[in-house]
Amino acid sequence: MQTAQEFATAKVEHVALQMDVLQEIRRHLAPFSVEGHPISGETVISDATTVDSLTIMDMVMELEDRFDVTIPMNLVAERSEEHTSELQSLRHLVCRLLLEKK
């Protein structure tokens, strides 16, 4: 059974991981931001940025390199809301892949 200290440590590490992934995605999308649409977790990439599919693929490859994960291309290609069209969903996908790797 996990102690309160171990639980708290795991929770802090998980939040730190999420913030790191979010920051990395935001860094990649910042140059493509549409004026008046700040990049946040709720950002719908196609609505708030001028990013094209090639740029998304480049960003995905850089995320894979940065976090040492493989993001399935079918999930990226679908660009459905539950996968990559919303920044928060992309963050969750990368975090899930990182946690599964452990």
Image: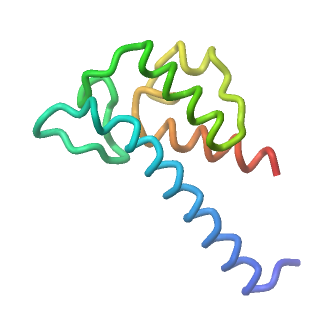
What residue is drawn where x is 64% and y is 33%? Answer: 64
Q: Residue at x 30, y 39 (%)?
A: 30
- Expressed as whole percent of the image width and height from the top left, the position of residue 49 reads 26, 28
Q: Classify residue 45 as left or right of residue 93.
A: left
Question: What color scheme is it?
Answer: rainbow
Q: Residue furthest right?
A: 1
Q: Horizontal and vertical percent for residue 53?
A: 42, 13
Q: Residue 11: x percent and y percent?
A: 64, 70
In the figure, 64 relative to 6: above or below? Answer: above
In the displayed image of the protein, which residue is found farthest to the left?
Answer: 36
Vertical relation: 10 (above or below) 41: below
Q: Is residue 92 above or below residue 81?
A: below
At 80% from the left and 45% from the top, the residue drawn is: 101
Residue at position x 65%, y 35% in the image: 65
Q: Is residue 46 left or right of residue 83?
A: left
Q: Is residue 77 left or right of residue 68?
A: left
Question: Is 13 or 11 nearer to us in this picture?
Answer: 13
Which x, y percent locates residue 17? Answer: 59, 58
